[in-house]
Amino acid sequence: MAAAGDKADQKALKGHGALSNPAGRFERRRLQAIDEGWYRDEVPDVPAVCIAPDHARSLISTNDSPDIPFAQSINPYRGCSHACCYCYARPSHSYVGLSPGLDFETKLFYKEDAGRLLERELARPGYRCSPINLGSNTDPYQPIERRLRITRDILEVLARCRHPLTIITKGALVLRDLDLLTQLARDNLVSVGISITTLDPELKRRMEPQAASPRARLAVVRTLSEAGVPSGVLVAPVIPALTDHEMESVLEAAAHAGAGWATYIVLRLPYEVTALFQEWLAAHYPDRAQHVMSLVRQMRDGKENDPRFGSRMRGSGPFAELLRNRFHIACRRLGLDTRRAGGLEAGLFRPPRAQGAQLSLDL
């Protein structure tokens, strides 16, 4: 008998990046499924997607990390059906008693009443305006946004208040909100970063099953650029021996599409993501799995993950230095700014009037 989680029994599920559903690191009990051959025909090949409200008391998260170019962020969703096998946000599902594996891709939560919560926070007397990032953890334009429109509600509030923001996404749905983005761009209030990991459609299908195609993402960059919305590209994550050879090609395609800036992030494997990514590698690329992980460890001082500020995004050692040099040489050749969007206008911010507040005497 073999456990359902054994590597020999694992196979890719259509539309999903994770191959298993391991318990989160905070769970005290562990369940092990045993495949004895019974009821095999009754087990669904693809887990059903469940969507539920996330009853958040606040919307804006803050950070003081020295290697993150924003101090405030909003994540409209918990979990992400883009199902990227490498996603560093997967461990966040452990905080709510769910698995970072298939649960992260199929048990999705949305910030209920996001527009009202945001207005309340922006109206606080002590609020200090600085750019808010959408998409620092999970994608604000994943497929369920088409129906739920949580990101759209947030954008409408920020546009009314003339509040600066940045967006990170690998979803083509961002173009639905081009009306708001162009309005914000006229006052230097927005910049959009499109994440492009690979230009290979087959690799993308295996690695990011539900995300937009590479061609569609480049088309987003082109459309944003032509509409006057500042945009750039994140070559992220760079996976050694799997996608790193495409760095120059991605940057060149982005420059031709009109991207104004570019940055990159090397593969990060925090907590449960390490085992999940190695399962994915063994299933899809068994011939190079050991080589990939060997190079990952070379960039992480012999470990599989390095959470230290300054090195977690870029890595260290000879291979990481090679990536850094290649990136900067390519960006100089292509005229891409290597600094992520900065200098957005914060002086136009007009806070919403708090409910029941006295009318202002300003003329």
Image (spheres, rainbow, N blue to C red):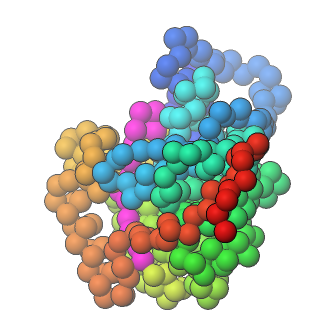
Question: Which image quadrant for residue 357?
Answer: top right
Q: Does residue 296 show up?
A: no
Q: Residue at the location (60% across, 22% down)?
A: 97
Question: Residue 221 at what x, y percent from top left?
Answer: 58, 78
Question: Residue 95 at what x, y percent from top left?
Answer: 55, 27
| Quadrant the C terminus occupies | bottom right
Q: Residue at the location (36% across, 46% down)?
A: 64
Left or right, 221 with respect to 286, comes to: right
Left or right, 336 with respect to 315, comes to: right
Question: Residue 288 at what x, y percent from top left?
Answer: 38, 53
Left or right, 235 with respect to 99, comes to: left
Left or right, 39 with respect to 77, comes to: right
Q: Residue at the location (71% across, 32% down)?
A: 55
Q: Residue at the location (47% across, 23% down)?
A: 25
Front-most of residues 293 and 210: 210
Residue range highlighted in magenta: 261-275
Front-most of residues 32 and 62: 62
